């Protein structure tokens, strides 16, 4: 059996913050014991809001930061044991903001061809051909090769960022909010492109977003995070069709489709905003949860299997009676 | 949205509003003849993509355009008072008192070196509504109303001590201190997480009803607009291309741009394998120099030679209007 392209086992990431003349240094736990896997050719949607640790997780998968605890395996091998070239051929990023992720002083061809040049792959002519092929693949015209990022629109820049990510033919692409900075008409073009490329190249994506409607379009499986912990995971159809965790349900309800008959959904989440520096005891979601009861602040729920497949970390779904109550 | 609220007095009346910005390459016609009316008890949403002129329109309404930008209008009144001829002193008296603004980023519109209490009180005292003591009482009441627990203790806090969602609630409370007739909110929830955005939108909708204000909400998010608007104005390339009651604009859009935008939005239902989202090919035209005819025609699937001629607003009796020559039948057959 081939190993999954990405496997994360019990990963923690802690940062020390503050610590001035008088202030005590505090620990921010951005990721607290996350395990997940992405099979080859699979799209895992990672959803959650600010401070849930999804971008920290992405940085560890890209090898930009080391976990404080736990393991990140790429293609079955620990990421720390891989050289830069090996790692770069397995996983590549596409970031949110194509305005800051592209060097403004280099042409599009130089930006897309840079990974090949850095890794010394092929001759100059071969690299030029590979770059041209990649630009065509992401829907850019040959004339764009000599353009600079400032001459391109936001959507075209994101295409350049995608071409650069794919030029080394990685197996996994980490897309961190790849369409959040784009207008809706441009977002749809980029999402369509990501679907096409997945189908044509057999790519696996770790697709990170706060927008469940966007994730729904692409993901085979979905993992929802809250304050550094996985609260729910499972097949996309199940998680988004019948969410078991109140937080996933709230995220789903907060997707506003342009349907005037629906009005604003009532969520009763209150105003206790999540703060990764002060994670509540027990279930981290309990101060905002509409279904909170006495057990929630005392005891952290375990991630347990739920009816319909997948797992959720909520006291309401523990045991057969709980599952009925949460449904 | 109930029938009783229809036909409230027109608080804001802007006709043929234009904003021109001189640039080295020629004049940028950023806003090209926008006509809008906001009634008491209504939420008017101005929606469009980057560069459509929606934010400049809202700044022009308030007379807050950046230096160099030139505003003209056939008419611009607030509760019957002419804003085009009002002296700067009178405009300053109106802004913050009769009209309040809420911006996207609460961190840039709160002063980081003043306490929440001082900032809330400032507007109230400045506009002569009462003493600092009275201002404090009103600040506490409003902070509680916008869902901030322990309001009295929050008055001594600084903006950096609050989360983004709480800061935006403080900004909303500040906007309401003087009991404005009109609140203009420019992307008030864009910087916030989805679940927190929903709380803020609910609050704005409740306050708008409770205080019988006119709310003008400027946003790029059609989902937000559909759920909160009484009336909608869709902007493209500096013009309003479609305008009308929310149900009509979303239920039966008549402008190809509005239709195109709706098709671009991923829906909550899972898409069939192989399905793709709709797209709008091409780019927004440059608004520098002279523009003629329909600005959308270069990207429009229905473009005809007549589209190069100036296009007037067409409308029906229900107050739904669109800047397009296509009749409904042609649009349906093409869909």
Image (cartoon, coloured by chain):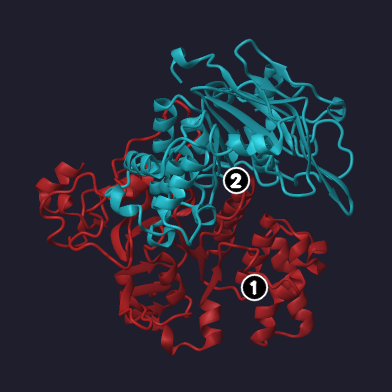
Residue at 62% in and 69% down: A101
Q: Output the chain of dot 2.
A: A
Instruction: Point out residue A121 in the picture as x, y percentages from the top left corner.
Output: 67, 85
| Chain B as rendered: colour | cyan
Instruction: Point out residue B125 in the picture as x, y percentages from the top left corner.
Output: 47, 42
Q: Output the chain of dot 1.
A: A
Residue under label 1, please give it.
A167
The residue closer to the viewer here, B288 or B5, is: B5
- Kind of element beneath mark 2: helix
Instruction: Please state which of the two labelled residues, at mark 2 or mark 1, is closer to the viewer.
Output: 2
Q: Which numbered dot is residue B307?
A: none
How many neighbours does mark 1 have within 10 angstroms: few (below 14), some (14-19), or many (20 or more)?
Answer: many
Q: Is residue A274 above or below residue A14?
A: above
Taking the image as shown, residue A162 lies to the left or right of residue B158, namely right
Taking the image as shown, residue B16 lies to the left or right of residue A4, namely right
**Residue A72 seen anywhere in this rendered image of the structure:** yes
* Chain corresponding to red in the figure: A
Residue at 47% in and 31% down: B228
Q: Which of the 4 image quadrants contains residue B296?
A: top right
Taking the image as shown, residue A95 lies to the left or right of residue B133, namely right
Residue under label 2, please give it.
A184
Q: Is residue A132 above or below residue B122?
A: below
Instruction: Point out residue B205 in the picture as x, y percentages from the top left corner.
Output: 43, 32
Of marks 2 and 1, which one's residue comes earlier in the chain? 1
């Amino acid at each position: 059996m081939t190993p999954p392209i990405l496997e994360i086992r019990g990963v923690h990431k802690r940062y020390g913050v503050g610590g001035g003349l008088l202030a005590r240094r505090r620990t921010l736990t951005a990721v607290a014991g996350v395990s997940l896997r992405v099979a080859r050719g699979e799209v895992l949607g990672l959803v959650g809001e600010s401070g849930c640790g999804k971008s920290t997780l992405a940085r560890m998968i890209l090898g930009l930061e080391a976990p404080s605890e736990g393991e990140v395996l790429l293609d079955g091998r620990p990421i720390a044991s891989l050289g830069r070239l090996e790692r770069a051929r397995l996983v590549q990023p596409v970031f949110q903001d194509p305005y800051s992720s592209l060097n403004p002083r280099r042409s599009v061809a130089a930006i897309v061809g840079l990974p090949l040049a850095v890794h010394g792959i092929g001759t100059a002519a071969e690299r030029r051909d590979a770059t041209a092929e990649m630009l065509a693949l992401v829907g850019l015209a040959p004339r764009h090769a000599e353009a600079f990022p400032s001459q391109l629109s936001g959507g075209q820049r994101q295409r350049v960022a995608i071409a650069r990510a794919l030029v080394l033919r990685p197996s996994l692409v980490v897309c961190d909010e790849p369409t959040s900075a784009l207008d809706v008409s441009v977002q749809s073009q980029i999402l369509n492109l990501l679907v096409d490329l997945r189908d044509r190249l057999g790519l696996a994506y770790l697709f990170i977003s706060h927008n469940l409607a966007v994730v729904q379009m692409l993901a085979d499986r979905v993992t929802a995070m809250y304050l550094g912990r996985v609260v729910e995971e499972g097949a996309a159809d199940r998680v988004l069709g019948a969410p078991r965790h109140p937080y996933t349900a709230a995220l789903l309800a907060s997707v506003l489709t342009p349907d005037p008959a629906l009005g604003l959904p009532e969520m009763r989440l209150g105003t206790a905003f999540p703060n990764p520096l002060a994670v509540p005891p027990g279930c981290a979601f309990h101060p905002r949860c509409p279904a909170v009861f006495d057990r929630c602040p005392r005891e952290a729920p375990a991630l347990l299997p739920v009816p319909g497949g997948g797992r959720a970390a909520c006291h309401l779904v523990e045991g057969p009676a709980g599952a009925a109550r949460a449904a | 949205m109930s029938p009783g609220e229809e036909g409230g007095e027109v608080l804001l009346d802007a006709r043929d509003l234009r904003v021109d910005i001189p640039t080295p390459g020629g004049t940028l016609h950023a806003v090209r003849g926008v006509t809008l009316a906001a009634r008491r008890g209504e939420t008017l949403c101005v929606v469009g993509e980057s560069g459509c002129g929606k934010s400049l329109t809202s700044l022009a309404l308030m007379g807050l355009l950046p230096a160099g930008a030139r505003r003209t209008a056939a008419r611009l009144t607030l509760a019957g008072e002419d804003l085009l001829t009002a002296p700067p002193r009178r405009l300053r008296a109106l802004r913050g008192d009769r009209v309040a603004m809420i911006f996207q980023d609460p961190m840039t519109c709160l002063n980081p070196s003043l306490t929440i209490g001082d900032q809330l009180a400032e507007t109230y005292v400045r506009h002569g509504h009462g003493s600092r003591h009275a201002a404090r009482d009103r600040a506490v009441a409003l902070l509680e109303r916008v869902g901030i627990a322990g309001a009295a203790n929050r008055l001594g806090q600084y903006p950096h001590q609050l989360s983004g969602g709480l800061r935006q609630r403080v900004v909303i409370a500040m906007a309401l201190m003087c009991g404005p007739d009109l609140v203009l909110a420019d992307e008030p929830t864009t910087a916030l997480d989805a679940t927190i955005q929903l709380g803020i939108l609910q609050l704005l909708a409740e306050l708008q009803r409770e205080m019988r204000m006119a709310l003008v909400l400027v946003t790029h998010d059609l989902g937000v607009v559909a759920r909160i608007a009484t009336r909608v104005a869709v902007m493209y390339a500096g013009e309003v291309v479609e305008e009308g009651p929310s149900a009509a604009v979303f239920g039966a859009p008549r402008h190809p741009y509005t239709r195109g935008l709706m098709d671009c939005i991923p829906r909550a239902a899972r898409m069939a394998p192989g399905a793709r989202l709709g797209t709008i090919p091409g780019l927004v035209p440059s608004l520098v120099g002279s523009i003629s005819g329909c600005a959308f025609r270069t990207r429009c699937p229905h473009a005809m030679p007549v589209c190069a001629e100036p296009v007037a607003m067409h409308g029906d009796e229900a107050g739904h209007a669109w800047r397009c020559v296509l009749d409904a039948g042609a649009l349906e057959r093409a869909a």
